[in-house]
Image (spheres, helix red, strand yellow):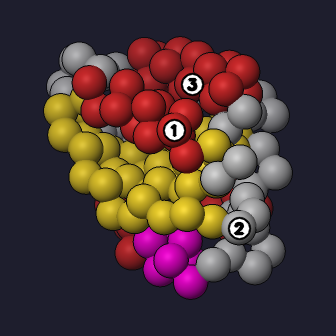
Amino acid sequence: MELSQLIYTSTCTDAMTPRMAYQVSAQSVAVCEQLGLTGRVFANNRQALAMTEGPTEIVRQYFQAVSADILVEATLLHYDRVIEAREFSDYSVWLNLGEEFAFCDKVRRLTEQSVQDALPAYPSAKLRIMATAYLYGDMLATG
């Protein structure tokens, strides 16, 4: 079975509240686990960086579903590449929403310190470059 990794960013509409973002994130985890997808999503109130991997056809269909979501204003696919092995052992979402939530094992708080816990110990160059480019002050700041 061919595996692919997609790395993309998205911007949500103003209708996406922090509470909705948390609920959507929990649903995303459940769907991705059911589909056999692994990866990470890092998000704040308006933007997200997603790294999703799994069977090529399924991961591409998942990306199309995210792109078509009415709460998503724009998506930009940075990489769609075939991989020999997964870089992530599971799927989780890391959030910086400016509000307190009962975070859990798969939906976690995004901070400057937690980013390192979320990434693989030895990420591929593409994954490391994208994480470095997008996980900076704006992503870690709410608003």
Q: Are marks 3 and 2 in contact (CB under 8 Å)?
A: no
Q: 127 or 18: nearer the eye?
A: 127
User: Circle 1 sits in a helix, a strand or a loop, which is it?
Assistant: helix
| Residue 84, numbered label | 2
The tag earlier along the polypeptide, 2 or 1, is 1
Residue 102 location, quadrant:
top right
Q: Which residues are magenta?
A: 125-132
Q: Main secondary structure of the magenta part?
A: helix
Quadrant of the image occupied by residue 37 = top right
Q: Secondary structure at mark 3?
A: helix
| Mark 3 or 2, closer to the camera | 2
Q: Nearer the viewer, residue 69 or 132?
A: 69
Q: Quadrant of the C terminus?
A: top left
In space, the residues marked 1 and 3 are separated at their CA atoms by: 18 Å
Write down the residue under mark 1.
57
Q: At label 1, which amino acid type do we have?
A: Glu
The three-letter code of the residue at mark 3 reads: Ser
Q: Nearer the viewer, residue 83 or 16?
A: 83
Q: Is residue 117 visible?
A: yes
Secondary structure beneath dot 2 equals: loop
Residue 15, above or below 105: above
Q: Earlier in the sequence, mark 3 or mark 2?
A: 3
Classed neighbour count for the residue bearing mark 1: other residues with Cα under 10 Å, few (<14), some (14–19), many (≥20): few
Q: Position of residue 42 (x, y in %)?
A: 51, 49
Q: Which residue is mark 3?
A: 28
Residue at point 47%, 54% (across, down) = 6
